[in-house]
Image (spheres, rainbow, N blue to C red):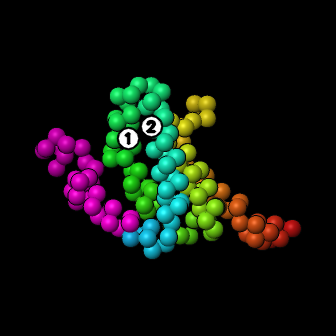
Amino acid sequence: MSLAFHRPVSWWVGDYWVLLPLLVLGGVLIVARLRYFAMLGSFAVVALGLSVAHGILSSLADVAQSLSRMGIHSMFGFFGLVMLTEPRTAPLGRWRQIAYGALVGLLFSPFTHIGSYYFTPEVALLCGNLFTFLSNKRRIRRWAGAFA
């Protein structure tokens, strides 16, 4: 099919604009049911804030392009509304959830790097999962007791 129409294969059901309403509706239902508004908000503020800051530092015209690239043409929506809010990997407690969202948002930003290593969204989520694991003192005591 892609050879006939000279278009890359990406999603067999439809275009991004077909997926967007389903993503927003489903994501809002998930966030509302789990009450993860603060976690999603901290993720969005940090990730989009870094994009805006980078755009302002390079040039004012890059701000709109950077936000467009981050919000519409990336997996930002799916990542924030579905993957970040997974209940089994999200921390318990409001402040831990806010810190978790901010940490993942910081590492999710395409402008965050350590030396020449740039974080992928998957690695950002894994770092957030490590934060969740380490922030639960009861779980750490249980693991320490198992290896003692």
Which residues, given as a range, are shown in magenta? 1-28
Give the percent coordinates (x, y) of residue 108: 51, 46
Callouts 1 and 2 close, C-beta under 8 Å: yes
- Residue beneath the point at 80% across and 69% down: 141
In the rendered image, which residue does mark 1 sit on?
67
Q: Secondary structure at mark 2?
A: helix
Task: Tell me if residue 39 can be seen.
Answer: yes
In the rendered image, which residue does mark 2 sit on?
52
Q: For the residue marked with disc 2, what is the amino acid?
A: Val
Nearer to us in this view, 84 or 67: 67
Q: Is residue 91 located in the magenta-colored stretch of the structure?
A: no
Give the percent coordinates (x, y) of residue 62: 37, 30
Task: Tell me the chief SS of the magenta region.
Answer: helix
Q: Is residue 7 located in the magenta-colored stretch of the structure?
A: yes
Question: Total of numbered circles in the picture?
Answer: 2
- Residue beneath the point at 59% across and 62% down: 97
- The quadrant of the picture occupied by the C terminus is bottom right
